[in-house]
Image (cartoon, rainbow, N blue to C red):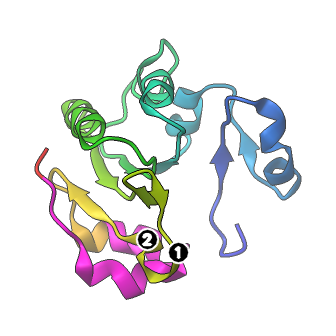
Amino acid sequence: MNLGHELTVWNRTAEKTQPLAAAGAKVAATPFQAASFSETVITILTDAAAIDTAYHARDGLLSGSVAGKLFIEMSTVRPETERELAARIREKGAAMIECPVGRNGRPRTGRKALRLRRRGSVRCRNARGRCSSSCAAASSTWDRWVPVRA
């Protein structure tokens, strides 16, 4: 928001959105409402069950049209969870970048904290433009992307 971006937030625990709302973010009532207000959706969830609920529930992120949107998925979950999610996102006409904040159950630290992985047909330049202004570490790690087969 400090860079002039509009921010829409949603959390399973509504009270956790209050500090961002006080700073000027819009608070969505549902995950899909958050996605409908955004061209880029960033998620970081605790496990595969939380991903399933946030993305695939009746009012989940993929419950309506998301064509053309970019999903940046930052949960630290098993690779098959991310591959299945990437396929479902592609089926809806959107793109996904995997950007886990941990590996093998351990959090990443330092320069390795933002190592992005391409999913599907995402154009690196487009995603880089969306992320670089918000993520200082994106520029230093961008060239180290690792393609992952979905």
Q: Percent from the top left, x then y, of residue 82? A: 29, 41
Extreme-top residue of the structure: 58
Q: Percent from the top left, x then y, of residue 100? A: 41, 56
Tell me the element at label 2. Answer: helix
- Please report the bounds of the magenta region as a residue range: 127-148
Pointer 2 and pointer 1: residues touching (CB < 8 Å)? Answer: yes
Looking at numbered disc 2 in the image, what kind of residue is underneath it?
A: Leu
Characterize the local packing of mark 1: few (<14), some (14-19) or many (20 or more) Cα atoms within 10 angstroms. Answer: few
Quadrant for the C terminus in the image? top left
Quadrant for the N terminus in the image? bottom right
Looking at numbered disc 1 in the image, what kind of residue is underneath it?
A: Cys
The reply to whether the magenta stretch includes residue 128 is yes
Q: Percent from the top left, x then y, of residue 87? A: 19, 35
- Residue at 26% x, 62% y is 117
Using the image as rendered, state which of residue 57 and residue 29 is in the foreground. Answer: 57
Label at residue 135: 1
Classified by dominant secondary structure, the portion drawn in magenta counts as helix
Quadrant of the rendered image containing residue 89: top left
Tell me the element at label 1. Answer: loop
- Depth check, mark 2 against mark 1: the one in front is 2
Q: Percent from the top left, x then y, of residue 13? A: 75, 30
The reply to whether the magenta stretch includes residue 121 is no
Q: Is residue 150 above or below residue 50?
A: below
Q: Which residue is labeled 2 in the image?
A: 114
Extreme-bottom residue of the structure: 140
Q: Is residue 43 above or below residue 28?
A: below
Extreme-left residue of the structure: 149
- Residue at 43% x, 68% y is 130
